[in-house]
Image (tube, grey):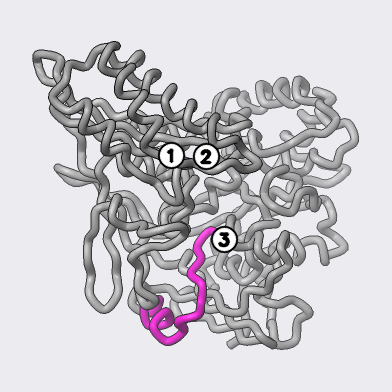
Amino acid sequence: MNKISFVFRNKIQTIDFKESKFTPNSTLLEYIRSNQKTKGTKEGCNEGDCGACTVVLIEKNDNQIKFRAINSCVMFLPSIHGKQILTIEDLGTLNKLHPIQQIFIDEHASQCGFCTPGFIMALFAQKADKINSSKSELVEAVSGNLCRCTGYQPIVNSAQEISKITDLQLFNTFLREDLIDKINKSDTIFINKDIFKFFIPFSLKEALKLKAENKNAILTSGSTDLVLKVTKRKEPIEEIIDISSIQEIQGILETKDEFIIGAGTKIEDIYQFSKENLPALSNMLAYFGAKQIRNRATIGGNIATASPIGDFLPVLFAYKAKIVISGKNERTVDVNNFVTGYRQTILNPDELIKNIIIPKFSPNQIIKSYKISKRLNLDISTVSAGFNLIVDKNNNVSDILLAFGGMAEMTKRAKKTENFMLNKEFNEENIVMASKILLTEFTPISDARSSKEARSIMAKNLLIKFYQETK
């Protein structure tokens, strides 16, 4: 049908790609910047690292409204179908500023002004989604926003003042749920323009059908990684199936024995859930990109890329997770059997990830995750690890799992080291010997992030750190 509809500037906007200058490879940022009245949204890095292009995305799923700050530079334009977009121009006017805008002025938090709209939109989204947000939560909300004038202290001061706002109506007044509800979100969207095809299914059954019929199509949900092929490498992606609107693969279900996480669940939602339920996962997700990225990226997308430095896989190894795969038949596999080689998985062309199952761990299990990177936030891991340990009443190791990312072509377990530690006393002497064995297990490569020698030392030190934290 070549059309998408969304709420923008208090109206339902429709883009007919057949007549538009935009293509399915265009980004939301390109669309916003094309509008003469919404130039406040800036293009900075164009890869989701600086936050200058931050806008607020309003979604309605299962009758729940979510305000999310997102990087508009890493969202394909068709993906905004059925959603509402707010930019800095929506919040206030010169004659009547929004309280957050006024606080920025009062606290002198804007210098050159280039980054300011992104900061304000990120803070707006945080307060709209959680009106009682604390200063620390607001500061975390802008961890993905860079200020090149180094005006961070006034911005932190602004966060303190913004935390005092208690009137939710100052945020909900911008919501146009009535318009969102008018948009058709049940009939599959098919955009066909020039060399491009873009599909948006609304059910798992339809997604599988499209995948079977379009074997060259690339699945995407958050697109925070995929879109960089277009924006940075200038590589057109001709066929895309966007599964971000499928409710069946979203959300978290807790049963007596396990947590079932939909593959399309946003990483930010998993992070918030894991704080009380899965501490090792929470520890890793605290440094997974910034909130704007976590608000779009999904767990299924991170796993399916099969990156050797992907953050999820080592900790999922430690939790002994399972992956549910949908296709002609549904099957469940252990996470350590899912990746078969560099950027390769057991997924068939007509399959996709449906759920990730994490068994509830017993009190005698010690599960930890670690990530080493050059920066605290917004950085790819150099070496990551997920460990699972059980010691008996005599302090002997009865079960151990040591998984590492960044040490090989895919996430791997240090099985020689595990075998050495099994049934031995969990003490410093044995850990030192185990760390020497660990040095022989992997043959990492040198790249822009680290030398191979440094990676080996990092892996060894993480094992020692694990011992020191759990002895």
Q: Which residue is mark 2?
A: 288
Displayed quadrant of residue 98:
top right
Q: Which residue is mark 3?
A: 223
Of residues 176 and 386, the one drawn nearer to the viewer in this rendering: 386
Decide whether residue 211 is among the magenta residues.
yes
* Outermost residue to the left: 393
Decide whether residue 45 is among the magenta residues.
no
Label 1: which secondary element? helix
> Reading the chain from its start, which is encountered first: label 3 or label 2?
3
Q: CA distance from mark 3 to mark 2?
A: 15 Å
Q: Image point 31% across, 34% down: which residue?
A: 402
Q: Image point 38% across, 62% down: which residue?
A: 345
Q: Image point 33% across, 77% down: which residue?
A: 205
Query: Tag 3: Cα neighbours inside 10 Å, few (<14), some, or many (≥20)?
Result: many
- Which labelled disc corresponds to residue 44? none
* Closer to the eye: label 2 or 1: 2
Q: Position of residue 118 (x, y in %)?
A: 74, 43
- Which labelled disc corresponds to residue 271? 1
Cβ–Cβ below 8 Å for labels 2 and 1? yes
Q: Is residue 274 visible?
A: no
Q: Position of residue 110 (x, y in %)?
A: 84, 32
Label 2: which secondary element? loop
Q: Amino acid at mark 1?
A: Tyr
Q: Is residue 254 above or below residue 111?
A: below
Query: Tag 1: Cα neighbours inside 10 Å, few (<14), some, or many (≥20)?
Result: many
Q: Is residue 212 above or below residue 305?
A: below
Q: Amino acid at mark 2?
A: Phe
* Closer to the eye: label 1 or 3: 3
Q: Position of residue 4 (x, y in %)?
A: 61, 76
> Reading the chain from its start, which is encountered first: label 2 or label 1?
1
In the rendered structure, which segment of residues is drawn in magenta?
206-224
